[in-house]
Image (spheres, helix red, strand yellow):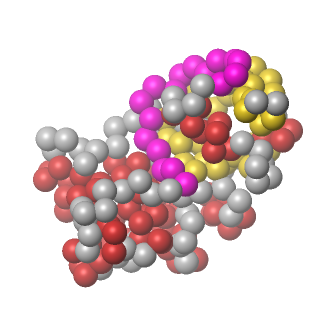
Amino acid sequence: MLTIKHLTKQFGKKTLFRDLCLTVEGPAVLWAPSGWGKTTLLRILMGLEEPTSGIVQGVGRVAAVFQEDRLCPQLTAVQNVTLVLPGSAEQYKEQIIKDFQQFGMDAVALALPAARLSGGQKRRTALLRALWAASDTLLLDEPFTGMDPDTLAAAAALLRERRGEKPVLLATHDREAIRLLGWPVVELENA
């Protein structure tokens, strides 16, 4: 269980959020207007930012999809996913390829270095990497950007299937993604 207690984040005199309290046991979609601080909140949960005050408990090991893809550009999509599987990458390679095929990526796309993939293909790679990583919590920042409707549906289905019992916080403005996931929506401006 992930717990946020009285979290406040300020940058100088600007307050992004104040006294945020939230408990997450399963999956949840974070919704707030642009500029509210969703990405900053996820970065705090990842340990990449310090809150001004408050505490976070129960995050454990994090697997994440950032707003930017953060792929190794010289590696293929499959190689980018196997990076999170040290020592056992070969064992799972066939299943990873099947996952990519479920996302509509063919052998030609899978042979390309990540630098040559489309934006949507890079997002699929980042999402699969997070799903394959050993983690206690999934933090996903706009993971469906650049995906067409069919790919979005496949990605949402795989995410629902593979998340296990771990807490998931997914920040998105995509109403179709929210509908497809069917997860509770936490309206942060009211939290």
Residue most extreme to the front: 12
Quadrant occupied by the N terminus: top right
Q: Work out whether 28 lies above or below 104.
A: above
Image location of residue 170, percent across then percent down: 60, 48
Res. 144 visible in picture: yes
- Confirm whether residue 17 shows in the render: no
**How many numbered dots are placed on residues in this image?**
0
Q: Quadrant of residue 128?
A: bottom left
80 and 74: which is toward the camera = 74
Residue 95 within the segment the image draws in magenta: no
Which residue is located at x 70 percent, y 22 percent?
52
Q: Is residue 2 above or below residue 26?
A: above
Q: What residue is shown at x 46% (from left), y 25% (from top)?
A: 60
Q: Is 81 on the left or on the right of 191, as rendered?
A: left
Residue 189: quarter of image: top right
Picture quarter with the C terminus: top right
In-image side of 127 versus 112 (left or right): right
- Residue 62 place in picture, x, y as percent: 45, 35
Relative to residue 181, is residue 64 drawn left or right? left
Pinpoint residue 71: horizontal percent, then vertical percent. 36, 56
Identify the residue at horizontal 20%, vertical 53% (top origin).
92
Give, as a single range, the part of the protein colored magenta: 51-67
Tell me the residue at 64%/39% (across/down). 40
Residue 132 screen position, x and y as percent: 34, 48
In the image, residue 132 sits, relative to residue 57, either above or below, namely below
